[in-house]
Image (spheres, grey):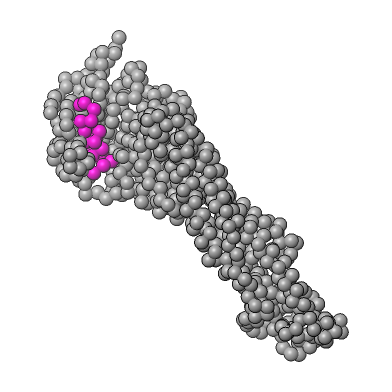
Amino acid sequence: MGRLLLIWRLALRDLRHRPVEAVLVVLAITAATATLTLGLVLRSFAVALGLRVGERVTLDGHSYRVTVTAVTAASPPYPETGFMATPAGVGDSPGQVWLTRADTISLATRARPLTYTVDVRTQDPAALAGPAGFNGPWTSWQAISAQDAKEISNEQLVLDVGGWLLGLLAIASVGVLVGGRLAEQTRRVGLLKAAGAAPGLVAAIMLAEYLALALCAAVIGVAVGRLTAPMLTSFSFFAGLLAKPAQPPLTPQTVGVVAGVAVAVAVVSTLVPALRAARTPTVRALADAARQPKRHALATTAWATVLDGRYPAALARALGTTPRQLTAGLSASQLLPALPGGIIGVPAGIGLYAAVSNGGGLTLPPFAWLVAVVLAVLLAVALLTAIPARIGAGHPIVGILQSEAA
Amino acid sequence: MTLLSARGLRKAYGRGGALVRAVDDVSLDVEAGETVAIMGPSGCGKSTLLHLLGGLDRADAGTVALAGRHVGQLGERGLARMRRDAVGFVFQAFHLMDELTAVENVELPALLAGRPPRAARKHALALLARIGLAGRAKFLPSALSGGQRQRVAVARALANDPLIVFADEPAGNLDSAATLEVLRLFDDLHQAGQTLVIVTHDSRIAATADRLITMRDGAFIDEIRLAGGSNGSLARLAGLDG
């Protein structure tokens, strides 16, 4: 009870003590959760159709009992686009139900007779005069292409929003990481300034490191994007109808935009802490402790939080906290800002999807899935905090206390 | 009764030509209720020795036994338990939690030890009253003077009624008036029978001890018993009674 009180007290006070970091953590978690939710919304329609055997389904006013479920490769699953040329225009929300012959016949009316859909590729498209050549609904490949393009456009919007959310996540994470790192480099700043470097030069040195990292990230990003893009688009058309779509082009403009975004992320997240470090009085910077936390390349806000909390953690250990208690406490303290972020992220993701879906039908994922998203995010935050905390709990207490007190 | 016993302690930093023997073959016995002061020039290894004795750091060689229990044989969890239950630390830089009030800082070790919050709070308030800071219980460290902060740190060190308190330059960051506050507090602890090991540059604080050890280059070079000790008059010894 006492320990629990202590954990939450320290967590709450730390949040109050470092509100900017708390906001960044909330922002990062919100972006992550919203992106995950977005993905779930995209996937949920397929599951929404996954009726269980024995349940009843109503089609055109007729109630049927589900006797069997099956899988077909004849039509791409939602949300990948497809097109079925029927008067109802089901291409916007494809899905298939198998009925017995008798049940199928019972659904037919004079206005909506039974039809078969056949994809035809003619040797001479110009020879087709239109519906007159067929006894039934007829749709040109241009119409199918336009319909697919509309679906692709929706997907692209969702991907764009997801991309922006991940961008925010990157800025927040890099901001926390860089802010912490530059604080560690105060002594280095002091030495540079003592050697005659002007504040502008010091800031430039600080920026250069992260600009180089940003350019590396851009190269990797372009390569990954180039390799994964076909996976996103290859399912979006009826394979074999009009041949597969062309490989997405990698233009110089695309490379330029990606590199520009990466550099912008680095500059936005580095500029303020770099300028602040550069303005630190030389004597104070020289007197500052040469702290030694080594930030891993995979550092996140959770890692940064643990590293920034080395001093209170060392102090707690000096007072008798066991490594297990310390790890549990630090993990729990990160759950506090993560929880509102996780909860906000779910409606944010749903809202974003609704906003970009052009008024299309929105099928919400099961409530349990949404709860699972929040729990998964919280678990990830706790684990990401626990790992470095456990490693850090093995470091000598004295060195940390002395470096902070120096 | 010997409470703390160290034999052949060694601790070195660096390698080759840069090797520094911070503690070099030091042995020490501290009796229960005794106050031992360790003095010496900066960098002579006083603080390192204190860290080894208190389980904050591990020795390269030698043994430390506290109440008959060998510290070197304890794992990380055992060391933590020892620091929590049997040992209290007072640091030169106070090392208070900035975001916690005075009373919350004092009750922190008790909460860590799993004491009920109400009992921990009651004990912490009693300790603050004992050091004359009952009226500052709700103050953050930033609102306290240096001397008051160090007194809060001493109260925190006493939160779990430790067998021994280690103080590392407790007046090192304090002005004369604040030093006197801390001086009186340590003398009170001494009179109350609390076992203390104090590393200090301040001869006034050293004068409150039963035994004064002088250290140089990682080794003990002198040891004297002081006449004042637990029966001495602090103000007279420190020359601050006027």
Residue B92's x, y, as percent? 32, 29
Residue occupying the far bottom of the picture: A102
Q: Which quadrant would residue A194 be assigned to in this image? A: top left
Residue for point 49% across, 46% down:
A211
- Where does the magenta region start and end? B40-58
Residue occupying the far right of the picture: A110
Residue A62's x, y, as percent? 78, 81
- A115 in magenta: no
User: Can residue A116 be seen?
Assistant: yes
Q: Which quadrant would residue A3 be assigned to in this image? A: top left
Horizontal side of residue B56 vs A14, given as left or right: left
**Quadrant that contains the C terminus of chain A:** top left
Horizontal side of residue B4 vs A396, given as left or right: left
User: Can residue A316 be seen?
Assistant: no
Residue B1's x, y, as percent? 16, 36
* Closer-to-camera residue (A239/B70): A239
Horizontal side of residue A257 vs B79, given as left or right: right
- B56 in magenta: yes
* Closer-to-camera residue (A250/A287): A250
Q: Which quadrant would residue B39 be assigned to in this image? A: top left
Residue B54's x, y, as percent? 26, 39
